[in-house]
Amino acid sequence: MKKYLFVLLVAFSLSAVAQEQLLEGVIASKMTMSSESPEVQAQLAMIGDINSVTYFKDNKTRTEVNNPMTGEAVNIIDSEAKKMLVMMNNPMAGGKQYAIKDITQPSEEDLKGMTITKADETKTILGYVCNVYHVVMSKDGVNMTMDIFSTEKINAVNQQTTTFSEEFKGFPMYMKMTMNQMGMDIIMINEVTEVKGEAVDAEKFNMTPLEGYKKVDKIQGM
């Protein structure tokens, strides 16, 4: 269970009223986790909150996550080239590894067991009007439900939603995922805490893997 949590966290594991499209900037997010199971909650408490920073510019997005328990992860997405680079440094999950994958439209198999419903309501978060989506997924014996508040005013990409159908649009400002496995629920909430429109160095989106990382076909959870 502990190893599964670490893999899931990496995968799941990216102020005025904003009316114009934000094309370049930095996003700070925080993920918190909880469970009614005392055993699982004890493990989650050891991990603590997981903070991430997302940089975006010219249809490219880079998300950095760093946590003492889950290790370091970097995800770079080039929407125009339809490529994704994932680098992970976690001694508990294979050490320094990287994988490059093509971003393609989800197949029927990818969408099997997934339903996405767009609600009529909207919600404003940090000045950004968000559409509300309800997602239900079932895969590999794990049932998940997600409530997502997503804005189309930020030109960034979230890795978690790249496998969604075209029904889903925008960048998630708030995501609540409830996962049930073997009768135990784990609740994960990822919320944007700050959005800054500022210049971002193009080098942030260099798709060349860092030295010392080993290429693998697939990183667990990615």
Image (spheres, rainbow, N blue to C red):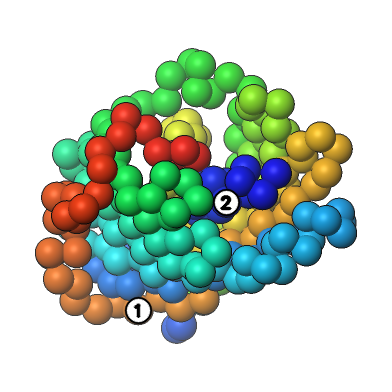
Is residue 51 in sight in this rendering? yes
**Can you tell which quarter of the image residue 144 is in?**
top right
**Residue extending furthest toward the bottom:** 16
Closer-to-camera residue (202/3): 3
Three-letter residue code for mark 2: Phe
Query: Dot 1: few (<14), some (14–19), or many (≥20) neighbours within 10 Å?
Result: few
Local SS, label 2: helix
Q: Quadrant of the N terminus?
A: top right
Closer-to-camera residue (177/1): 1
Rounded to the nearest whole Å, what is the CA distance between mark 2 and mark 1?
29 Å
How far across and down, in percent of the image, does residue 184 sit? 83, 44
Q: What is the count of numbered marks?
A: 2
How far across and down, in percent of the image, does residue 166 sit? 44, 33
Q: In the drawing, does residue 85 fall left or right of residue 12?
A: left
The residue indicated by pointer 2 is 6
Q: Quadrant of the C terminus?
A: top left
The residue indicated by pointer 1 is 196
In the depicted structure, whether residue 189 falls above or below residue 49: above
Closer-to-camera residue (160/18): 160
In the depicted structure, whether residue 106 falls above or below residue 118: above
Q: In the drawing, does residue 155 fall left or right of residue 119?
A: left
**Can you tell which quarter of the image residue 182 is in?**
top right
Residue at 34% over, 57% down: 74
Q: In the drawing, does residue 181 fall left or right of residue 162?
A: right
How far across and down, in percent of the image, does residue 50 sit? 55, 67
Mark 2 or 1: in front is: 2
In the depicted structure, whether residue 140 falls above or below residue 66: above
> In the rendered structure, which disc, 2 or 1, sits on the residue that comes first in sequence?
2
Residue at 78% over, 63% down: 42
Local SS, label 1: strand
In the depicted structure, whether residue 63 falls above or below residue 117: below
